[in-house]
Image: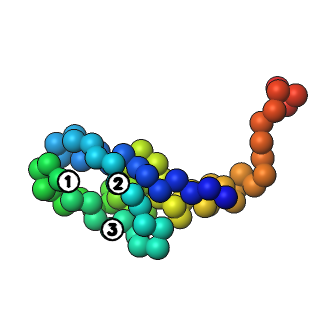
Amino acid sequence: TITILQTLMKCPNCRTTETVTMNPKIPGDFFTCNECKQTNGPRSGDCCVYCSYGSVNCPAVQEIILEWLGDFSWSSRDC
């Protein structure tokens, strides 16, 4: 299983984006924008800031999705 650790974070305050490497062992409780310096927590209902403001879900959610999908794969004969 491949987990994507790079995500593009977008600040909800100033809309600046920056690439961040997620640490799969540490939850993303807060994200401080390098541009405006605002510290952001996760939006209501999201598990972490990566799922709230990132272009890629956090490693924990990626694992859940992969488990849910199992070994499902598309092929032209399935259409």
Q: Name the residue under label 1.
A: 33
Q: Residue at x 52, y 53 (%)?
A: 4
Nearer to us: label 2 or label 3 = 2
Residue 52 in view: no
Residue 35 in view: yes
Q: Where is residue 40 in the image (x, y as percent from the top left)?
A: 23, 59
Nearer to us: label 1 or label 2 = 2
Q: Position of residue 12 (x, y in %)?
A: 23, 46
Residue 37 or residue 69, whichever sits in front: 37
Q: Earlier in the sequence, mark 1 or mark 2?
A: 2
Q: Is mark 1 on a helix, strand or loop?
A: loop
Look at label 1 and name its amino acid: Cys
Q: In which quarter of the image is residue 78?
A: top right
Residue 48 or residue 19, whichever sits in front: 19
Q: Name the residue under label 3.
A: 29
Label at residue 42: none
